[in-house]
Amino acid sequence: MVEPNYLPEEQKAWLKDASNAVKRHGFYLRKAIDDDNMKEALRYSAALLGELRTSLLSPQKYYELYMQACDELRNLEVFFRDEAGKGRSQGDLYDLVQHAGNIVPRLYLLCTAGACYVRGGEAPAKLILRDVVEMCKGVQHPTRGLFLRAYLVQVMRGLLPDTNSQYEGEDGGNVIDAIEFLLVNFTEMNKLWVRMQHQGSARDREKRERERQQLADLVGKNLTYLSQLDGLTFQLYRDIVLPRVLEQVVTCRDDIAQQYLMQCVIMVFPDEFHLGTLQSLLGALPQLQPGVRVHTVLSLLMDRLANYAATDKDVVEEMNGVDAFGQMSKVALKVVEQHPDMPGADVAAMYSALLGFSGTVYPDRLDFVDRVLETCYNALQRRGPINDSKAEKQVVALLSTPLDKYDAVTVLGLAHYPSVMELLQPRMKREVATRIVQTLLAAGTQVTTVDQVEMLFSFITPLVQDVEGLQDLLDEEDISEDQQLLARLVHNMQAGGGDTDAQHGMVVAAQRHFLQGGPQRIRHTLPPLAFSALATVRRVAAAQQGGSTPQVGCAAWYQLLHQTATELASVPAAELALQLFLTCAHSASEEAALEVTAYEFFEQAFVLYEESIPDSRQEVRALQSIIGTLNRCYVFGADERAALAHKASSYCAKLLKRTDQCQALLACSHLHWQPAIEGKRAVRDEQAVLSCLKRALKVANAAQQQLAVAGKPARGGDVSSGPAAAASLFVEILNHYLFFFDAGGQLITTAVLQSLLELVANEVAADACKDNEALQTFYSNTLAHIKQRKAAGGEAGAKYDGLWI
Amino acid sequence: MVLVLCIGDLHLPHRAADLPTKFKSLLVPGKISHILCPGNLCTETAYDYLRSVCSDVTVTQGDFDESTKWPDTQVVLIGDLRVGLCHGHQVVPWGDREALAILQRKLDCDILVTGHTHRFEAYRHEDRMVISTGSATGAYSAVTENPTPSFALMDVDGGKATVYVYELVEGQVKVDKLEFTKPQRGGGVGLRQL
C-alpha cells in the first residue's frame, strides 16, 4: 500500500475538516450523554472515532486529531462508569460496544469499556487485558495501530494487577500478567513503528525518519510503565523483561528503533539492574544494525555506571566482580570488528567513553587506559588516515580524556598514546599538543626529569617548531599564543628534590628544543628558561657557599645564561637581551661573587646599548636599568667599577634630551655611593658624587637656556617642557644634594646647600615659572621636607641648623 | 568608598605560569573600581586579565614590559587622595626610602604605589605613604630571594585609605590591615599646621 504524501497546506485543511467533524460528533455525544441515551452515545462516539480511520494525515497531524478524540472519549468513560450505578452491568457494555461497525472505533470503544469493566471490579484484570491486547492486533495500519495501542496502554496503566494493587488477585492475576500485557503491547507497537519506515516512496525517507523520531516516546512509554511496576524485581527483569525486550530490539532490525530503545532501556531501568545483566545488555550491542550509533548507547551506559560507581565503593567491587571493564572493552572490540565501515569518528567516540568510564571507576588502572588506546589504535589504523573533521574532533577528545582523569605526564608515557596521536594530521596534532600543555598547566603537573622533558617535547613539536604541512595555516598571532603557553609550561619543569644538576639537564634539553623554533618563537620561550636558570643558579651559589659541590657549578649556569641572552639578542630582541644581561650581571656579582663573569655580562649589555638600541626613549630606559643594576653590584674592584661607571656616565651626555641627560646624571651619582649592606664593601666616593651633581647642574643650566629659546611659559601641571621643566631639574638636583647631605656626605656642607637653595629659589621665582603649579608644589614639598628635618631635632636635625630658608 | 587594587610585577609568563589560584579566586570582577599596576605585567595577556577584573586600569612602565607604551609615572585622584604610580627601577638606589621620597615630593602624591623590589612594604614617610606592592606571582627578583606573592587592596574613603595586604604564605592567604589618613595641610610652605 502506498501512502499518499500531500503538501502541508492540504494536510492542514484535512486536519481542520476532521477536527471539525470530531467536534460536531463530540457535541452530539455530550448531548446524548445528557439525555442518558446509550444508543446515541455509542453512535456518536463511533462516528467521532471514525475520523481516526483516515490515512491522509501525517503522524504529527494524526497525533493532534488523536488527542482531540481522546478528550471526547473521556466524557464517554465517565458516562460508562455512571451506567454501572444505574444497574447496567459493565459486562453488557463490553459486549455492546463491539457492535460498532468499523474496527478502529470498535477497538477504541472496547478499550474504554474494558477499562471500566476492570475498574468496576466486575471482571478479572488479567482476562480483559489479555483480551484487549490481542484484539488490538486487528488494526495493522502503522499509524492507526500505534495510536490505538497508545490509547490502550494509557487507559489501562492504572488498572494493572501490579503487586500491592487492588487489581491483583487470584482471578485478577499478578505482576507477571501486568508485565506480560506491557511486553505484548510493547512488541506490537514496536512492530508497527518499524513498519512505518517502509511506507511510502524512498524519496521521503528522511522526512519519514523525522516523523518516526517524534513517535518514539509512544513506544517508549511501555518500557517506562514496566520500570514503574512495584512488583518488578531484579529476577523478573533479568529472566523475563530484558530478554523479551532485547529480542524485539534485535529482531526488528531497524536503526531508529534499535537506537532509541537501547537508550530507553538504559535510561528507564535502575543502575543495579544494568550491572546485574551487563552481559546480556552488552551482548545485544554487536547484533544491532550497522547504522546504529552503538557508541552513544555504550557511552550512555558507561556514563550511568560510572556515576553509579561514584556513589558507593561496594559498587566498584561488584563491577570488578563482573569484570565490567573487560566486558565493555570486549564489546567495543566486537562492534568495531563487525562493522568495518563504522566511521572513525564513532570508533573514537566509543573508546573515548570507555576511557571516561575507566577513568572514573578505576582511577589507578593506567594499564586499562593503555589497553583501550591500543585497541582503538588498531581499529582506527585500519580505517586509514583521519582527515574528516568529525573524526578528528573525536580523536582529540579521546586523547584528552585520560589527560583529565589521570596524571598527564604518566599518560603521555603510555606506549600507545603516541601511536594514536600519530594518526592525526599536523593541524590536529597541534590541537592535541595545546590540550596537553593546557592540562599540565591547569593541574600544575610537574615535569621532573630530563626524560620527561624529552618525552613532552616529542608530543608538542607542532607548537615548538615549524612542522611540515602546518606553516601556511598559522599566522603570527597563533604562534605567539602557542609560545605563551610554552612559556608558562617552563615553570612546571622542576627537577625532583630540587636537584640542580638534573635541573641543568632539563633546561639544556628544553633550550635545545626551543632553539629549533626560530626567532619568532624564542623571543617568547627563552626568557622563562633564563629566569628558571637564574632561580636555580641562586640555589647553586648558596650550595657552593655552603660547602657542597654540585656537578654543574655556577660557571656552567652562567655560560648557559650567556648563550640564552645572546640568542635573544640575535632575534633581535635587544632590549630584552640587555635587561637579561643586566639581571645575570647582578646575579653573578651578588650571588656567585664572580667578578669577571659579572663584568662580561655588563660588557655585553653595554655593547647592545651602543649598537642595538634603536630609539632615544628606549635608550633612556636601558640606561636607567644599567645604572640601577650597577648601583647594586658590590663585587667589582676599584678599576673595574671605575671603568663601568665611567662608561655609564659617558652615555648620559649622549642622550638626546637635556632633561634626560640631567636625570641620568643624577642617577649616576649613586654609582659612587652605594647603600650599605651587611657584609659588602659599599663604594663611597663623595668627590665623584659631587662631580656628577655638578655636571647635572651644568646640564640644567644649558637646558634652561635651550628651553627659554624654544618654549612658551608653561602653565598648569605640565613640567615636561618649557622653562618650568628646567627649573624642575634644579629642584630635583637640590633634592639629590639633600639626599647625600642626609646620607652623611662631608663635602656637601650647609654653605653649599645654602647657595644652592638661593639659586633654586631664584629659578623657581622666575616669571616663566611662577604660575607652574607642579613646579611650585615640588619646590614647596622640598622646603617642607627640609623644615621637617630641621624640626626633627637630635643629631640629624642639628645638621640643618645652619641652613636658613 | 572606593576599592582600589594595587598589583604589580606579575612577570607573566616570563617568571611565573600564572597568578596563584587563591589570588585569582579573590579577584572577582565587579567589586574593584580601579586597578593600579606599577608595571611589569610583561605581556598583553596579563594586561587583559587585569582588565577583566576591572576595566579601569592604570599602568606605568616596568623594565621588563614587552610594550613600551606606558608612561614612567602617573598620578590619579582617588577620593581626596593623590595616588602616584611608578615602577621604581628608575629610582636609584632601588627601593630606597629617601630616593622614593624625592619622587613622591615631585609627584606631590599622598600615596606612592611602587614595585620592582618584589618585597611588600607599606610605610609612612614624612606624612605620606608608600606602598610597594611586591610581586603578585612571587616572581624571581634580582634583589629579593624567594619573594612572597602579594598585592594590596585599598579602600579609599575621602582622605582616608584602609590598606589590606594580601600575602600568600605557605599556600595560605594572609591578610594584614593598615590605615592611612591624609594630614590636614595648609596651602603653602611653612603653613603646615602642627
Image (tube, coloured by chain):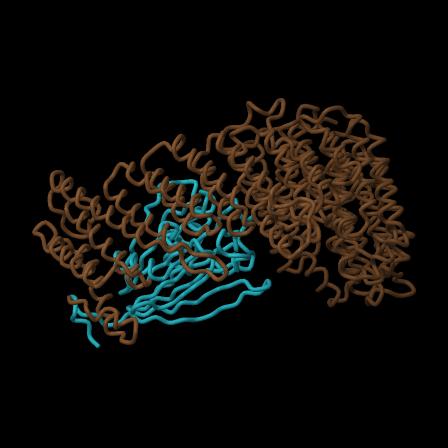
Q: Is residue A207 visible?
A: no
Residue at the image position 70 percent from the left and 27 percent from the top = A386
Which residue appears farthest toward the left when viewing the image?
Answer: A767
Task: Name the one closer to the observer, A361 or A132.
Answer: A361
Q: Which chain is painted in brown?
A: A
Residue A774 appears at what percent x and percent y?
A: 19, 55
- The picture's colour for chain B is cyan
* Count of numbered badges drawn on the protein: 0
* Figure quadrant of the C terminus of chain A: bottom left
Residue found 24% across the figure and 53% down from its top: A733
Relative placement, left or right, of A539 versus B183 is right
- Camera-nearest residue between A202 and A457: A457
Image quadrant occupied by the N terminus of chain A? top right
When asked about the image quadrant of residue B94, the answer is bottom left
In this rendering, would A330 be left or right of A144? Answer: right
**Residue drawn 18% across and 42% down?**
A703
Percent position (x, y) of residue A32? 63, 55
